[in-house]
Amino acid sequence: MVEMNLNRRQFLKLSGAAAATLAVVELGFNEKKAYAASKELKIAKATVTPTICCFCGVGCGILVHTKNNTVVYTEGDPDNPINEGKLCSKGTTIRQLYTSEKRVLKPRYRAPGSDKWVEKDWDWMLDTIAKRAKETRDKSFVEKENGMIVNKTEAIASLGGAALDNEECYLLAKMMRGLGVTYLEHQARI
Amino acid sequence: MATEYVKLVDVTKCDGCRACMVACKNWNDLPAEPEEFSGTVQSHKKTTADTWNVLQYIEHENGKGDLEYLFRHSSCFHCTDAACEKVCPENAISYSKFGTVVIDHDKCVGCGYCVQNCPFEVISLKEYKDKNGKEYKLSQKCTMCTDRLEEGLQPACVTTCHTNALEFGNKDEMLAKAEKRLSEIKGKFPNANIYNPKGVGGTHTIYVLTEKPSVYGLPENPKVPTSAVVWKDYAQPIGKMMIGATTMAVVGAFITNNIISKRIKGKEDGGEGHE
């Protein structure tokens, strides 16, 4: 056995070094704390918004979890009597309506006779649509047919897309009926 | 151990909608993996590092000359005696308190032993690049949504399944359910069986199958490779002991040497001490 004949200075040096090492180990490698911090549930601080699936006529309820201005998770709404928390493979993908890289973010315009899509800003797009809709409607509006009031135009048609939700479809239908559009369709019924 | 949980897959109720596959990608933020059409309705050949569960569409002739699709939700089995856990040299794979088998990516070095030794071929390596452009690999597989279990939620695939082909719950409860279901379907499917292989100590994903496991592409009697047991239970501890002993000897020698030499030096200097 080695003779531990330490003087006071050596003893203090050694114990100081030991204490410092322990302190570093304690601070630097608190695995449990680091683990807990990195493993927070990804929907823990998310805002939950109920919606209705846009894809088919069943109308399943969906909960959308949003955080930092993006959708982090979507799941079937367990409180919805229609789907009771379940979803099909397509309804489960609804998050990608917002997050997909393929999503078109700006309006595109293809002029009559052209074979190219051109990006336009919203102001130009809305003005042009309004102008042309009014022009076409004024030209083609029928007030009476066979003595009956019909107030319709057959020169305009509306085709709702697969990614429109319940509320958007309602507003679209309202507006189109107001214009007198009779050819009013939606993807889910085709 | 807290309550052990089991995912029960009843293939007779599955309609092959693949919502479980999408729900898994959705929860775990896994990217899509488009694959070429390979002549079958099945979307992916097998599980990969970014596709943790695959719905198998097995084309089966049912003896009457008719073609039948056998559906099977295939993902990690979460074995009770997991070969991957045994072979991992970094102890990166462990059992959670729920009985699930999870990979700690801080410890994983991407050696791929688990990939080679998994009897069900459900673990895959994925290549990543760090911020300096250096490539590294990590093993990936189904976690049974252990992060969700910790918050009292069920796995994402189970919550979305609209036919209840996937069910999740207490181990004993699920086993009883499987037995009950087996007795119900025995008449219609004489080859029906419960797949909960004993060679790996039972699993935490249990199947009610309508045909023999081999028809579903499953090993009839999966086992933890003997080499893995020898490596983990004998070779590694002995090796570690030897490394430990060597380290202790080196460190011990260094410290004692240091102290002795200092003491001698101190004596020679003629009293630096203040006793």
Image: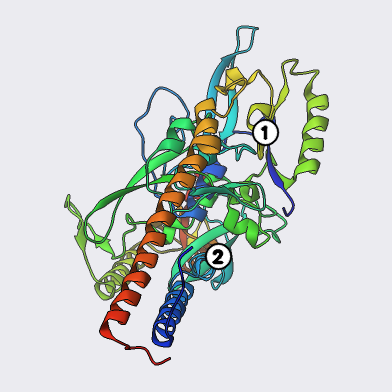
Residue nearer the viewer, B216 or A23: A23
Say which quarter of the image contains residue B248: bottom left
In what element is the residue under mark 2?
loop
Residue nearer the viewer, B50 or B120: B120
Counting from the top left corner in percent of width and height, residue B141 is at 49, 43
Residue nearer the viewer, B273 or A31: B273
Query: Could one spot residue B180 in this view of the protein?
Result: yes
Counting from the top left corner in percent of width and height, residue A157 is at 40, 55
Q: Is residue B62 above or below residue B8?
A: above
| Residue found 17% across the figure and 49% down from its top | A115
On residue B229, which mark appears? none
Of the residues shown, which amino acid type is indicated by label 2? Leu
Q: Residue furthest bottom?
A: B274
Disc 1: host chain: B
Residue A29 appears left or right of B80: left
Disc 2: host chain: A
On residue A41, which mark appears? 2
Q: Is residue B262 above or below residue B204?
A: below
Q: For the residues marked 2 and 1, what is the alpha-carbon distance in whole angstroms?
A: 30 Å
| Residue found 68% across the figure and 60% down from its top | B152
Residue B65 appears left or right of B167: left
Residue A30 appears left or right of B15: left
Query: Could one spot residue B106 in this view of the protein?
Result: no
Residue nearer the viewer, B12 or B169: B169
Of the residues shown, which amino acid type is indicated by label 1? Gly
Q: Is residue B191 above or below residue A176?
A: above
Counting from the top left corner in percent of width and height, residue B202 is at 68, 33
For label 1, the residue is: B201
Counting from the top left corner in percent of width and height, residue A142 is at 43, 62
| Residue found 54% across the figure and 49% down from its top | B23
| Residue found 47% across the figure and 29% down from its top | B42
